[in-house]
Amino acid sequence: MTHSRTVELEGHIIDSGTMQRCFGAVMDLGGSFDVERFDVGKHETEESYCRLTVSADDPETLRDILHELHQNGAVLEDPSEVDLVAAPADRVVPPDFYSTTNHPTEVLYDGEWIAVERIEMDCALVVDPDPAADAGEGNRADASRGEDGSPRAYTKTLNAVEEGDLVATDQSGIRVNPPERPRSGGGAFGFMQGGVSAERPSESTIREVAEELRAVKDEGGNVMVVAGPAVIHSGAGDALADLVAAGYVDALSAGNGFATHDLERSIYGTSLGMNVETLEHPRKGHKHHIWTISEIIRAGGIEAAVEDGVVTEGVMYECVRNDVDTVLAGSIRDDGPLPDTITDAVEAQDAIREQAHEADIVIMLATLLHSVAVGNCLPSTTKTVCVDINPATVTQLLDRGSAQAIGMVTDIGTFVPTLAEFVLGDDA
Amino acid sequence: MTHSRTVELEGHIIDSGTMQRCFGAVMDLGGSFDVERFDVGKHETEESYCRLTVSADDPETLRDILHELHQNGAVLEDPSEVDLVAAPADRVVPPDFYSTTNHPTEVLYDGEWIAVERIEMDCALVVDPDPAADAGEGNRADASRGEDGSPRAYTKTLNAVEEGDLVATDQSGIRVNPPERPRSGGGAFGFMQGGVSAERPSESTIREVAEELRAVKDEGGNVMVVAGPAVIHSGAGDALADLVAAGYVDALSAGNGFATHDLERSIYGTSLGMNVETLEHPRKGHKHHIWTISEIIRAGGIEAAVEDGVVTEGVMYECVRNDVDTVLAGSIRDDGPLPDTITDAVEAQDAIREQAHEADIVIMLATLLHSVAVGNCLPSTTKTVCVDINPATVTQLLDRGSAQAIGMVTDIGTFVPTLAEFVLGDDA
Amino acid sequence: MTHSRTVELEGHIIDSGTMQRCFGAVMDLGGSFDVERFDVGKHETEESYCRLTVSADDPETLRDILHELHQNGAVLEDPSEVDLVAAPADRVVPPDFYSTTNHPTEVLYDGEWIAVERIEMDCALVVDPDPAADAGEGNRADASRGEDGSPRAYTKTLNAVEEGDLVATDQSGIRVNPPERPRSGGGAFGFMQGGVSAERPSESTIREVAEELRAVKDEGGNVMVVAGPAVIHSGAGDALADLVAAGYVDALSAGNGFATHDLERSIYGTSLGMNVETLEHPRKGHKHHIWTISEIIRAGGIEAAVEDGVVTEGVMYECVRNDVDTVLAGSIRDDGPLPDTITDAVEAQDAIREQAHEADIVIMLATLLHSVAVGNCLPSTTKTVCVDINPATVTQLLDRGSAQAIGMVTDIGTFVPTLAEFVLGDDA
Amino acid sequence: MTHSRTVELEGHIIDSGTMQRCFGAVMDLGGSFDVERFDVGKHETEESYCRLTVSADDPETLRDILHELHQNGAVLEDPSEVDLVAAPADRVVPPDFYSTTNHPTEVLYDGEWIAVERIEMDCALVVDPDPAADAGEGNRADASRGEDGSPRAYTKTLNAVEEGDLVATDQSGIRVNPPERPRSGGGAFGFMQGGVSAERPSESTIREVAEELRAVKDEGGNVMVVAGPAVIHSGAGDALADLVAAGYVDALSAGNGFATHDLERSIYGTSLGMNVETLEHPRKGHKHHIWTISEIIRAGGIEAAVEDGVVTEGVMYECVRNDVDTVLAGSIRDDGPLPDTITDAVEAQDAIREQAHEADIVIMLATLLHSVAVGNCLPSTTKTVCVDINPATVTQLLDRGSAQAIGMVTDIGTFVPTLAEFVLGDDA
């Protein structure tokens, strides 16, 4: 017996690759399709429309196919309301709960399509019928919205689900809007391109990143920088500090190692014991690293160390002075850690999540761990720039599927100074 | 003033990504399009048809756009005959000569679409109106074909073009047929997938390669192996020799280094002076490598060394014994070289070209140089398997755009033994 | 004015590279030396002795030089007692506190050289004059020792230092014993070799690891495995589970991702939604991953899920069944996390530290984060095997300076099955 | 029965690591040693002396040990004359011929130690008793030397050996002088350091390379640049052209691909069809690459194309204009090739050899193939700088054992412009 459903797709579904992916998914999963109507956009600005019926030999296969089509933006021809089930306990979701994508999403609730807030992948989707009755906080929707009492929908990590939350199950009444290919060229920002070619001109690409950064700031946007310790080892700390001082960084997401190396540079003039300018004394056993941590503990934290004059330059110094929203997330490889480091992973994730949801562009500099953590919290609509010397790292970060991403396999030690020069120009 | 042309596309142009690429190219290059007709294949087995008019503000842009569409299979609505110009001298092609893709191609000559022989990218396309009058050789079409005197078309490298050859110019009268997405799943063979994910199960993927290898041999197909010296260093020589001995390798394309390491193993039991089994004596200054070359020179070549009993095992030994079509191509980093090594790059390329054109599947093992050389000669329809520890190498090889390719980032030293075990099974 | 001190070195100081490093350090740092006596060991089993006076133009340079020599095992000719200062507050160490190396270390206290317990680098060194009066816990010395009331010395991370702890400062009265080159060949285990050559035979090297693993178990030793999620993606989970089931793994140190992938494999037969055997359905949006976490939360943890029959195979299953000491350390990129994951980095580090101090051999499988975390806690005398596809990861791990380490750049997906086959042989 | 020989070593044999390697080799190979005398240099400027007797159970082991010691500079206590055997035929060397290292070497002939000319590893060592009687050519000693008729010694590749050449066998009467650790710090140039750490400050390291480059030119030295096509793709062509124009490059060693990309840039303003400044039109099928080759063939070569005004800028243009000694070596992956490309590997190697023997410093830019080819011809005393984005490439190049080498894992597209800026400064 054949099981069938009819779905609809519309938009720039040909050149965005949507139709290719949908047809491919049906064939890969062993189903078949019947195109009932296909109106192609006659010009590049006109949208297309497709209605097709997909069939499979068993309901499980059909369900898998519909799941794939759903994620590519297909909607059932005659959508029913979202199916909500109350969470039986804190952190426990109903079986068959809906797991979000990182694309803009809507739910059909009470006859209306409501936009889902705080879009992020791999979360539960919670609907709050009466937000006014609720003083939601933390992993919840913005307090500033929904004051009119109309229902709201937002994502919640499994960890944040509370008993009684109305959690969406299955995928009925949920509509995903994957990003479409922009009508005009994105320059160095590729559209949904997973691969990374090394065969691109480096300085021209950095120039495009610089122009994008200036454009975002000109529009009052939020720039988030994610930085690994290699930024400091490689001697790029001064250039990043310059960008912070000039107001080009709104949020910094890093780890204990990054901060310690940067602070060591300010206190002792070295990084891992090596003088970054003269290349002298590169010795393994040097104690500056652990002494730096000890000094900051003694001062009572980074801000106090800046106030006390213990720290007088560098990225952390400029972040304190310029009120940059800074999150130092702990990890199991940390020395110390510094008193400022958030050692609990869930707490740190929540802090990163707040930063990520504010960002208009994220610049990921030579850190896989922190970049993945941030990337996990980003909607597909946020611009991202991923820079690493290891092509596998860049590939992994681009694979997340940001609609507008630049991946560069380059040396962070020359990238940041060149970027700073292009961004700051004569002001530097 | 607007310049326009109308082109047609047909086939599985949606799920093969053709339409996406064509629409994208028009937009990227600053043109616009007008879809005049679009008949979508209703089922997965039905082909689609599209007629569209593309426009641009100047003839150069239109030409660039048409070039892109042409390479994706678009044909001018009312195609004219191929435009041939005689080569003015040996190795000199007419300005604006047509440079081939690696896809199956036809030319419209004398009212008929003729299939182009010896498909290979970046070549000139030569039409021979009267093959019978010609005793073509070398970089020319097969002598065994075209005996009826009907016109023929084939590719020629720039280097092989002779004065008077009729060389296609522009792209009129030329039709390219890019590979289409296969209707049934290709298993581990991805369709036109450039990127390489490391997140695939290794042994299962090797099992698929083994099954493909057996399938090709079962159908009487030709298996070509391209191997770098790391196959021997890594201890995988015995496994490759087993595959050769069992008849699974029809052609071997390698270099002087590969052969020397393999022969050292047979003569001295070492590779670069290290005993591959016991890991003893890994010393840089060891003389076995250069002594091996000297021994083979003394013997008069590899075949003579096998006959004389100087070489008694290994990959080269099995290739001699099993009449495997072997090409050792020289390079500037060679020691020696061995007398069997073809030191002229053009001559070596021609020998590789002959192998590549015969191959039904090509297994590329841990060599960028030889794999690229072979890949340059392959039509997009030949199956390829690329194995290397360096993801950038695998990415570069897959970027060529074989329609059916498996890329694996893995250790050649465990890959080949595992493959041999899966292929040979109980016979081993 | 010249500042000078006289130091002594003894042992296999020539072939272990000690003299080379010491002479080099003096010259690099701008000092000079005067060899007062040098008795070279006449045979390979005889130790050498060197007394030299080092001089520098200023006390800071002399101090830096002495620091380097100290770390290489040099002792001041006439050593004074260790210089102890009480920690002024919790987590606050005295200025100029001594930061430990990962080599066996002794302190001269009350006229006796006492061995420092729990050797680990970048820690404070605490002396407890009267252990009997102290119910030491956590980051402190073993409760089972020092019952006789004799003074003890141990390492403490900065984080664990408590007000009043007697912390060693400067380096007087402290003696470091760096590992010496073993008199008989270490086979695949290189002595202090930082670099990683890809030119080693893979299967022979894996065979050496297997023999070492069996030897450690035959002697009743403790085997610690550090594993990343790629072990599961790459299809190597079954082989690792076999090693656990056969008793070859005493401790497992991993993260939330590793455990989740392994559990998904047991519950749904997939890894990241892909069937690891058939390679079917490799789709990004698959929900198995997040559903797995939800199932384990619902069950109340991994052990409960095993007891309830929710999880019936895999690495985590075998760890529960075989009472393997398992630590799942959280990180900011975790989904969920699982209830078993330790989310606080400091707490997780302490748990890892306990495992690391017990281990006789550590096998690091395809994880940089967890391997570095473990490596930070290891004395230089623990054997380590580091396996990763990325050469930079292997280099970084070997750089720590374990005296006996094997680094392999290979595919974890073929490494673990091959290792299991060599270890388990006919028993498998 | 024990077999023994006594050898002597002298020089900075402790801090250069010589003693460590010699003692290690004896133990690794299963022998034993007896130090008969050891005079250690009391100060850093004084040399040491060691006489030791090595013993083994069989003559083969003793021979292997002596071979290792020999390569580290040990000389038999009472050396005999070099043992010469006439080559029986062209390219055929006597069995047991001596294979050279890349270290300065002398032979004891007719009672005198003669310095071996044209030092290069893996060659035969030929002695010419009467050079005056000989009109040496090609792979032979310099015609300008030995005019006094005194005997001379030089290296010859196997390929260049002629019937009757007097070839050294065994290692008697041959003395190797491995480089010693320089007495004063080599800055960024490490002494015999194989490994490559990414944890170095990029711009400071580039500054050291720039200073070295200026220093070599100030002393009238010869700078050789080895460049891969990525230099052009990455947009660094202009910067390299600037260095050539300013006289900082005496020799360029590259391939057909490098030259073609550079020429395409001059003729069409693109690289692989992409406009390097605007990043527009990055399309695979672009014909500029093959058209460029065709244009140069038509012009009759690069020099003719420059003279005809076909090529008006770029690296090749500046090389022609500044009479830079340029070698384009062919390879099997070449398109075309250009008429200037030397397609025979042996002929190309000889041309590279001439360049390499002249060089005082070699800068290797993003090419493994050409860098290895050049590296094979270099004595260990030539300074080398190896730059590549792939750490494995840099490691492989440094492993050759140049006494003074800098390895940088960085992006060639930012390295060359930064280097040019530091070298040319205000002149640029």
Image (cartoon, coloured by chain):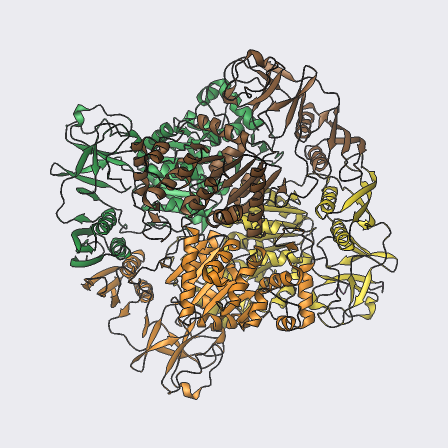
Chain colours: A orange, B green, C yellow, D brown
Above or below, D193 against C370 in this view is above
- Residue span colored magenta: C140-150
Answer with left or right where residue A383 lies relative to residue C316. Answer: left
Front residue of this view, candidates B58 and A10: B58
Above or below, D41 against B63 in this view is above
Residue C400, position in %: x, y?
A: 64, 52
Number of numbered tags placed on the structure image:
0
Front residue of this view, candidates C310 and C64: C64
Residue D74, position in %: x, y?
A: 71, 28
Q: Main secondary structure of the magenta part?
A: loop
The single residue placed furthest to the left in the displayed view is: B111
Front residue of this view, candidates D395 and B384: D395
**Quadrant of the image occupied by residue A337:** bottom right
Residue A306, position in %: x, y?
A: 63, 71
Answer with left or right where residue A379 lies relative to residue C426. Answer: left
The quadrant of the image that shows the N terminus of chain A is bottom left
Above or below, D48 against D98 in this view is below
The single residue placed furthest to the front in the displayed view is: D427
Answer with left or right where residue A270 lies relative to residue C104. Answer: left
**Quadrant of the image occupied by residue D405:** top right
Residue D268, position in %: x, y?
A: 32, 44
Q: Is residue D416 visible?
A: yes
Residue at image x 58%, y 44%?
D211
**Quadrant of the image occupied by residue C322:** bottom right
Q: Is residue B107 covered in magenta? A: no
Above or below, D283 against D373 in this view is below
Residue at image x 44%, y 54%?
A408
Answer with left or right where residue B180 lies relative to residue D98. Answer: left
The single residue placed furthest to the top in the displayed view is: D133
Q: Is residue B206 visible?
A: no
Front residue of this view, candidates C317 and A18: A18
